[in-house]
Image (spheres, rainbow, N blue to C red):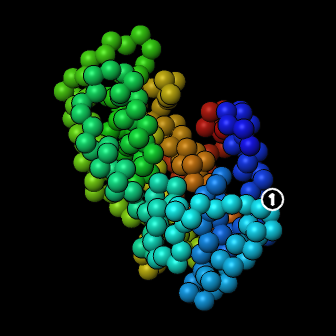
Amino acid sequence: MPLGLCNAPSTFQRCMTSIFSDLLHDCMEVLMDDFTVYANSFEACLSNLAKVLKRCIDTNLVLNFEKCHFMVTEGIVLGHLVSNRGIEVDKAKIDIITSLPNPTFVREVRSFLGRAGFYRRFIKNFSKLALSLSKLLLKDVEFNFDQHCSEAFQELKNRLTSTPILQAPNWDLPFELMCDASNSALGAVLGQRAGVGQPVHNYTRIEKKLLAIVFALDKFHSYLLGSRIIVLSNHATLKYLLKKPYAKPRLIR
């Protein structure tokens, strides 16, 4: 396929999905030209690998042997270290980010936020921490990398070196959705217990709290769809909205 075509990525992905359609989500996952074959045992993994390689032969797909890793217990997948422990950041990428000097131009700030933002789900309050840096990207704003920006820059780098491990959800347990909101950020954390914009400035406190819940439900909808959910919020008055005979249109939405 020629390089540079605007529809090339989606076309290539559609082609790969079509080729491995009966194997997807059963014994393999594929994104563009990267795919992972998995199983719960060595023998089952060999069997699944044989199916995938035969499919590659039948469809004339050519693999780069130097980029292939066979029968490993952990590996880098789409910029993340995946193992039986869960999903972790790629230490090699983190080392590059943490070695960056203080930005001196807007494009360097944008580059840093792009790199760090790739792992934002590992960093609690990422948007809040990066707020002073994000303001430097606004139009018609003078570039001034002050003390607040420097502290945010270093804090984000420190957080990247001590990120948690994300584990796969247990679909038999209820999800707990914790939400919060302020004038500058929306926050949400989706978890389970082990073993058991500018117009927002004008919102009332209860509207901000509701907006945080809507934001969280939308962000984690792929996990929450069809599951029992417990929403945790630090605004007790939200529960009385269910009994309210009428409400403002914004609250109803």
Q: Residue furthest left?
A: 147
Q: Which residue is mark 1?
A: 18
Q: Is residue 232 above or below residue 173?
A: above
Which is nearer the eye, 178 or 57? Answer: 57
The residue lying toward the viewer, choosing from 109 and 217, is 109
Pick the residue in front: 65 or 69. 65
Q: Whole-percent x and y of residue 207?
A: 52, 36
Q: Give me the residue at 59% from left, 75% from top.
A: 38
Residue 52 appearing in the image: yes
Residue at the image position 52 percent from the left and 69 percent from the top: 69
Which percent across, then down, holds residue 90? 39, 57
Quadrant of the rendered image containing residue 214: top right
Residue 125, by quadrant, is top left
Compared across the picture, whether 226 is left or right of 166 comes to right
**Crowding at label 1, few (<14), some or many (≥20) Cα neighbours within 10 Å?**
few
Element type where label 1 sits in the image: helix
Q: Is residue 56 left or right of residue 66?
A: right
Q: Position of residue 249 (x, y in %)?
A: 66, 32
Q: Residue at x 32, y 43 (%)?
A: 97
Residue 65, percent from left and from top: 56, 65
Q: Nearer the viewer, residue 146 or 17?
A: 17
Residue at the far bottom: name it: 43
Left or right, 133 with reference to 82: left
